[in-house]
Image (cartoon, rainbow, N blue to C red):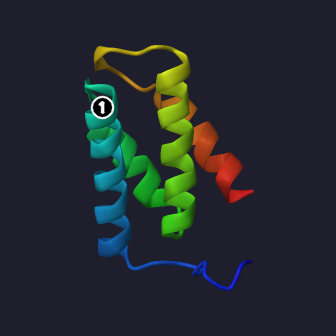
């Protein structure tokens, strides 16, 4: 583990970071993630620190960009769980 990465972050800090990153994805792609709350819950329940949250959000952002998503979108929860598992391994 790099010296700047914490083993775990406080729940409130992590929750705030995840919400901010998901909102930034919406703003940068001019779309609405209709299941944003459920995605955030999956992440909050599983990731341990802000670095892991950033990695999952980056993967979601990439998936959205590659697929040219627009408007109101639903990010598949199994996809989010897959990203979380990859980050946790």
What x and y, as percent, mark residue 23? 27, 44
Query: Is label 1 in a helix, a strand or a loop?
Result: loop
Q: Quadrant of the C terminus?
A: bottom right
**Dividing the picture into quarters, in which one does residue 88 lie?**
bottom right
What x and y, as percent, mark residue 26? 29, 34
Q: Does residue 49 lie above or below 18 as drawn?
A: below
What x and y, as percent, mark residue 43? 45, 52
**Dividing the picture into quarters, in which one does residue 28 lie?**
top left
The count of marks equals 1
Q: Residue at x 47, y 24 (%)?
A: 64
Q: Residue at x 39, y 79 (%)?
A: 10
Q: Does residue 71 lie above or below 27 as drawn?
A: above
Q: Residue at x 68, y 85 (%)?
A: 3
Front residue of this view, candidates 46 and 18? 18
Q: Residues within 10 Å of mark 1 (few under 14, many from 20)?
A: some
The residue to which callout 1 is attached is: 35
Q: Quadrant of the N terminus?
A: bottom right
Q: Residue furthest front?
A: 28
Q: Is residue 7 left or right of residue 33?
A: right
What x and y, as percent, mark residue 65? 49, 24
Q: Residue at x 49, y 57 (%)?
A: 53
Q: Does residue 24 lie above or below 89 as drawn?
A: above
Front residue of this view, candidates 38 and 64? 64
């Amino acid at each position: 583990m790099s010296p700047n990465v914490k083993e775990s972050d406080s729940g409130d800090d992590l929750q705030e970071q995840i919400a901010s990153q998901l909102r930034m994805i919406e703003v940068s792609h001019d779309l609405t993630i209709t299941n944003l709350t459920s995605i955030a819950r999956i992440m909050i329940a599983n990731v341990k620190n802000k670095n892991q949250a950033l990695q999952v959000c980056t993967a979601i952002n990439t998936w959205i960009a590659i697929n040219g998503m627009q408007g109101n979108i639903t990010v598949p929860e199994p996809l989010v769980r897959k990203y979380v598992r990859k980050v946790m391994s």
